[in-house]
Every structure is written in C-alpha cells, then in structure tokens.
Image (tube, rainbow, N blue to C red):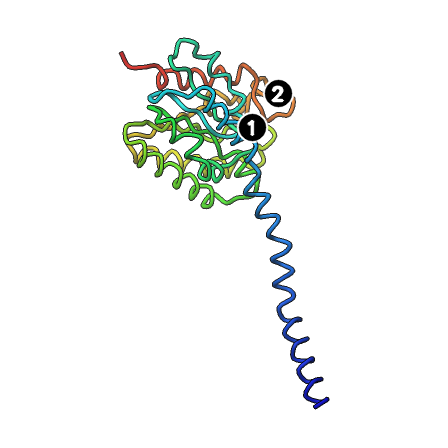
Amino acid sequence: MRSFTIQRAALLLLATTAWMPALLAQAQTQPQSDAKADRWAEAMEKFARQDERRPYPQGGIVLTGSSSARLWEVEKAFPDLDPPILNRGFGGSQYSDIVRHAELLVLKHRPRLVILYSGDNDIAGGKSTDQIMGDFTTVTERLLSELPEATIAVIPAKPSPSRWKKVDQYHALNARIKAACGDEPRMRYVDVWPAMLGPDGKPRPELFRDDRLHMTADGYAIWNDAVRELVTPKR
C-alpha cells in the first residue's frame, strides 16, 4: 500500500513538473498581451468622448495614423473646409493599431475621404515589409468595403533623418504601397518624398525638429500642398 502511495505521488510530481513551464509561460505572457491590447485604451476613450460631445458629420475627411498625423494641424492648414478635417492620429501607433480600432477612428464617421499615415513605427518596431503590408491590406480592404463611396489617400512612410539607416526597407514598403494604390481606383498614393529630399538625396534637415523624426511647419507645408487637391471639394 505504501509503495502504491509513493508511486502515485511520484506520478503526480512528474505531471506537475511537465505542465509547469506552460503554466509559467502563460502567466508571464498573459499580462503582456493584455497590456498590449489596452495600450491605446486611454486614447480611444478620449476620441469616444469627443465624438459624444461633438458628433462629426458624415461626408467629411478623417485623418488617422501615427504621431506625424497627430501633430498635423489640419484644421489650421485648411480653415475653409466644412466640416473641418477630423484628426484621429495617435502617436506611436502602427497599421495594426488602425486595424484594431478602425470602427472608432474612421468607419463610424462615414467620411468621403480617409487620409492614412503609418509605417514609420512599424519599421522601427522591427516588423518585416510583409507583416506591414498584411496590416495595410487588412485596413484598406475594410475601409474600401465598408465605405463604398470614399477615397483612401495614403501618405507613405516619410524619409526621417533619425531612421535613415533603414531607408532600404522604407523604399521596399513604399513601393508595395504605391503598387497597391495603383491597382485600386479609389486609392491615392500621396508621394511626399521628392519634396522632402535635398540635392544629396537625403532628408532636408530643416523639415525636422531636433529629434530628427517629427516635422517642423516647413515639413507640414509640403504635406499640405500634397493633399490640397484631394481635400478640396469638387465644384
């Protein structure tokens, strides 16, 4: 009897030991997954409150993307637009975050034009071009499907001095985004690169703040000119 009890205890110990790594891994990864899912909770709650206080009319223009979108003073740049461009940029975001929050950011507003800017942080975060294009395709296909009258304007990942060492991946990503836009009549590729590069083929320093990533007013002036025709209502 005693031998049987010892044998059962040994088997139980072996089973527990076998399962322990999986249990530990789950305990370690679950909080990280939850934290990642909740990363933009505060920003999304802020947007939701703004929508509740001042609902945005249908048929307008929605801008969304990372910090370069968030810092773009589009209402000041295009003061005659009615309704004004709705800025739903959130700093540090990637295309995958737009995928996750597309309903709140864009779809609920039923815009005539969507301006997307992302890719910068995706590349800096170590994602491959295939991964980024997967997220890009997911979000643009959903927007095209659920907003059948809308145009989707895409600003490619910009040439930033602080991330110039990754320029080859920027070129690879932007080439594929340009091709995707060319294949879809309701998408526009807004190429800001030529105006942002100097005679040496590198980013013009005066277009960037001290962090060599975010743009100055001169940088945004280029973007304003690049989208002006798109945002101006047809007469």
Question: Which structural element holds mark 2?
Answer: loop
226 displayed left or right of 21? left
The amino acid on which the numbered mark 1 sits, given as a three-letter code, is: Ser
Residue at the location (57% across, 17% down)?
216
Distance of label 1 from label 2 (alpha carbons): 10 Å
Identify the residue position indicated by label 1 in the image. Answer: 160
Q: Foreground residue, 82 or 144? A: 82
The amino acid on which the numbered mark 2 sits, given as a three-letter code, is: Arg
Q: Is residue 203 above or below residue 37?
A: above
Q: Quadrant of residue 187?
A: top left
Mark closer to the observer (1, 2)? 2
Which badge, 1 or 2, is on the more N-terminal residue?
A: 1
Residue 51: where, in percent of width, then height?
45, 24
Q: Quadrant of the N terminus?
A: bottom right
Identify the residue position indicated by label 2 in the image. Answer: 209
Residue at the location (38% across, 26% down)?
109
Residue 235: where, in percent of width, then height?
26, 11
Q: Foreground residue, 27 or 98? A: 27
Residue 79: where, in percent of width, then height?
43, 9
